[in-house]
Amino acid sequence: MQVPFVDLRAQYLRIKPEIDTAIQQVVDDTTFVAGEQVHEFETEFGAYCAQEPNSGGDGRRSESAPIPLYCVGCASGTDALHLSLLGLGIGPGDEVITVAHTFIATAAVITHAGARPVFVDICEDSMLMDPDAIEAAITPRTRAIIPVHLYGQPCEMDRIMQIARRHGLKVIEDAAQAHGARWRGRRPGSLGDAAAFSFYPGKNLGAYGDGGAVVSADQRLIERIRSLGDHGRLDKYTHATVGLNSRLDTLQAAILRVKLRHLDEWNAARRRHAARYIDGLHGSVGLPVVHGDAESVWHLFVVRTPERERLRAQLSQAGIASGIHYPIAVHRQPAYTNLGIPEGGLPVTERVAAQIVSLPLYAELPEDALERTVDNVRSFALDKSDR
């Protein structure tokens, strides 16, 4: 039996009637751009991100809930980050602090906005932005911070926001891997000035193609981003600014509306699988650590070993797929050698990048496939100890 890294077909088959009906409705309606399904999804996803743990699960807020969150769809998670920067007025001459342990898009959007990415190191245990490293990186040109909620776990947002407010900086959450996660009971979108989500097919909430969204409590910011992503449009032929063409299409919105109804169930399954990995692999490899105030949605289950390639080879031989997210830190990418950051400049980031391995993890992962993976990783560890 082969164990895939992710199985999107298994997910589709479980919700096939709902998905097929949603797709057919869009085809029948033929409003493929800016259809009603887009508006409905934006409303529902904004409500989902604002939902408290003790609410009824339908997106309605309790009496103590925070102010409403607003959502605008766009063409990709990359565009969600880019449009957030543009909407906040960040551009040439500005600096934005982020991490190099992420997909390159986090930094690329800063560059595309005309600003300069400034990288800080990560924490050894969580592999997320180290709040202790932020203030030393702030200069008179710093305008914003982009913490990355990597692998499904939110960053230490209270500390990051305190630093940002003290220095008058904006905070854009890169929540591309954190749909439904929580920091002290609150979800991305309610933690910073804005949160950027990706709906790439393999995400916890994935479309059947590219898609993204920005969520914020700032309604004016959301409307500004909506205009920027629609050619800077005020009405059909009036354009206030030079914008982009970045809209969430109706077909993807319809699919995402179906999947959103299942997201909490899928995230709960991911947490169960992650708990079994942690229990079964204790003492075998370096295990991920979740902050006590965070609730991870386990987009990825990432372990660490200095013998990464040998572990991956052993898993492959057993028919078990694995991945590396991400093997080359952004500051070591050829595209960013111009920043002049020397090898060793971000020691924790570089050490982590050399050791990480992502194991199969998705809601529909069969129990026997999970156990086979656990057994093979433990076998690798035992073989290592005998050397």
Image: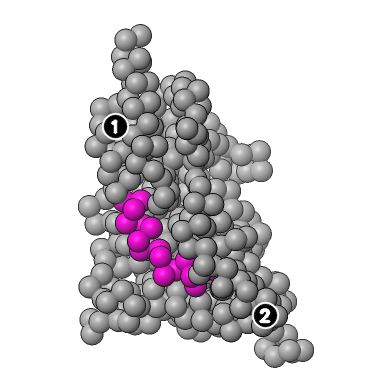
Instruction: Find the residue positioned furthest to the top.
Output: 387
> Residue at point 30% right, 81% down?
61
- Quarter of the C terminus within the rendering: top left
Identified at 44% across, 30% down, the residue is 355
Image quadrant assignment for residue 69: bottom left
Callout 2 amino acid: Asp
**Alpha carbon distance from label 1 to label 2:** 50 Å
Residue at image x 56%, y 73%?
Answer: 21
Q: What's the magenta region? A: 255-271
- Residue at 47% over, 36% down: 3
Q: Nearer the viewer, residue 171 or 105?
A: 105
Residue type at tag 1: Leu
SS for dot 2: helix
**Residue 217 location in percent, x, y?**
42, 78
Which residue is label 2 attached to? Answer: 28
Residue 267 forms part of the magenta stretch: yes
Mark in front: 1 vs 2: 2
Give the class, few, some or many, for how many residues have Cα within 10 Å of label 2's Cα (few <14, many ≥20): few
The residue nearer to you, when weighing 232 against 200, is 200
Q: Which residue is mark 1?
A: 281
